[in-house]
Amino acid sequence: ANATLPYVLTLASHGIERAAQIDPAIRKGINLWHGKLTHEGVAEAHNLECFRLPF
């Protein structure tokens, strides 16, 4: 079974913003949004500013 298929279907059906709102796993997988770093762990590891997702 393909473990990524449910995520692909959710993204295809709803678009990334709505998919991130309804599926926490998709939201956690977003590292960059419009060129801004949004993943806290990556930001801390590289001593960079972390931005919140706007949705």
Image (tube, helix red, strand yellow):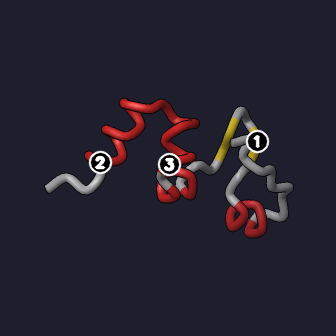
Point out the frontmost of discs 2 and 3. 3
Numbered label attached to residue 36: 1
Point out the frontmost of discs 3 and 1. 3
* Residue under label 2: 6
**In the foreground, 7 or 40:** 7
**In the foreground, 21 or 8:** 21
Residue 50's quadrant in the figure?
bottom right
Mark closer to the chain start, 2 or 1: 2
Residue 9 place in picture, x, y as percent = 31, 38
CA–CA distance between discs 2 and 3?
13 Å
Numbered label attached to residue 7: none
On-image quarter of the C terminus: top right
Circle 3 — which element? helix
Circle 1 — which element? strand
Circle 2 — which element? helix
Say whether residue 55 is left or right of residue 46.
left
Residue 44's quadrant in the figure?
bottom right
Residue 48 place in picture, x, y as percent = 83, 58
Residue name at image x 76 percent, y 41 percent: 36
Do the residues under discs 2 and 3 have CB atoms within 8 angstroms? no
Mark closer to the chain start, 3 or 1: 3
| Amino acid beneath label 1 | Lys
Residue name at image x 69 percent, y 62 percent: 42
Task: Sort mark 2 into few (<14), some (14-19) or many (20+) by Cα contacts within 10 Å.
Answer: few
Numbered label attached to residue 22: 3
**Residue 51 vertical placement versus 11 (above, below):** below
